[in-house]
Image: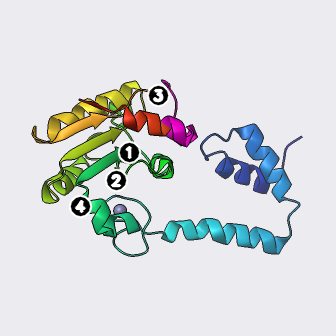
């Protein structure tokens, strides 16, 4: 028994989402087939508009103008402390903990030679430029603990000038976990226990 091509095509798109397998994609799409056409159109438009979002040219977060609200804040920039994260979800997780008062840089991933992710893909040059221009004194590497995360931290440590303090969050974060799924208390502990690299 084959499903109509329209449904198969929608399942294919849906299963591209992180954490969504083919089975759960099918369940969601079949549920959507019961929606009114006007609701489906609204759903489609909301997704389409995501493509028009603009990013902060300094840190990579979403921004209405050329910079996001954090990068526009003098207090946050004057803290001279940059927290380097892998993704927007990690950025939000740390921001939710309310323990960090500097600014951020979103790498967009970690080094992964097998997947062709090198320093250029991670915009490390832009990060270094930002660190030098703003005379940043402290860099906190809030990368998830993994082989790639560790390698990325070592690489970043090697490109920053030696007089800059480079620390990495560590204790309190379970191996193989993702910052996004941790509660604010665990993140607070991890920030408290950051250590020099
Ligand atoms: Zn920004």
Determine if residue 46 is in view.
yes
Question: Badge 1 local density, few (<14 within 10 Å), some, or many (20+)?
Answer: many
Asked if disc 2 is less than 8 Å from ligand 1, the answer is yes
Residue that badge 4 annotates: 78
Tell me the quadrant of ligand 1: bottom left
Q: Nearer the viewer, mark 4 or mark 2?
A: 4
Q: Classify 55 as above or below 143.
A: below
**Crowd band around label 4 with a 10 angstrom C-alpha radius: few (<14), some (14–19), many (20+):** some
- Bounds of the magenta span? 172-186
Mark 3 vs mark 4, CA separation in Å:
28 Å
- Tell me which numbered mark, 4 or 2, is placed earlier along the sequence: 4
User: Is 179 part of what is drawn in magenta?
Assistant: yes
Q: Is there a contact, CB below 8 Å, between mark 4 and mark 2?
A: no
Residue beneath label 1, please? Answer: 85
Q: CA distance from mark 4 to mark 2?
A: 12 Å
Callouts 3 and 2 close, C-beta under 8 Å = no
Instruction: Give the quarter of the image for residue 130.
Output: bottom left
Number of marks in picture: 4
**Label pair 1/2, CB-CB below 8 angstroms:** yes
Residue 46 in the magenta stretch? The answer is no
Q: For mark 1, give the secondary structure.
A: strand
Instruction: Tell which circle, 1 or 4, labels the residue nearer the N-terminal end.
Output: 4
Asked if the residue under mark 3 is in contact with the one under mark 1, i.e. CB atoms within 8 Å, the reply is no
Nearer to me, 112 or 177 = 177
Using a 10 Å C-alpha cutoff, classify the residue at mark 3 as few (fewer than 14 neighbours), some (14 to 19) or many (20 or more): some
Mark 1 sits near ligand 1, with its Cβ under 8 Å away = no
Label number found at residue 104:
2
Q: Is mark 4 within 8 Å of ligand 1?
A: no
Of tags 3 and 2, the one toward the viewer is 3
In the rendered structure, the answer to whether residue 84 lies left or right of residue 155 reads right
């Amino acid at each position: 028994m084959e499903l109509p091509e329209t449904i198969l095509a929608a399942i294919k798109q849906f299963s591209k989402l992180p954490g969504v397998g083919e089975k759960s994609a099918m369940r969601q799409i079949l549920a959507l087939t019961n929606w009114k056409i006007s609701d489906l159109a609204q759903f489609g438009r909301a997704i389409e508009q995501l493509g028009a979002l603009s990013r902060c040219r300094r840190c990579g977060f979403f921004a209405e103008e050329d910079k996001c609200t954090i990068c526009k804040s003098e207090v946050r920039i004057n803290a001279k402390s940059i927290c380097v994260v892998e993704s927007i979800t990690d950025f939000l997780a740390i921001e939710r903990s309310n323990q960090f008062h500097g600014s951020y840089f979103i790498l967009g991933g970690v080094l992964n030679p097998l997947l062709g992710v090198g320093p250029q893909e991670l915009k490390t040059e832009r990060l270094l430029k930002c660190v030098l221009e703003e005379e940043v004194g402290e860099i906190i590497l809030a990368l998830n603990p993994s082989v790639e995360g560790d390698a990325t931290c070592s690489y970043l440590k090697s490109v920053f000038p030696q007089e800059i303090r480079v620390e990495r969050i560590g204790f309190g974060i379970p191996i193989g976990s993702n910052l996004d799924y941790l509660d604010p208390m665990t993140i607070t502990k991890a920030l408290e226990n950051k250590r020099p690299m």
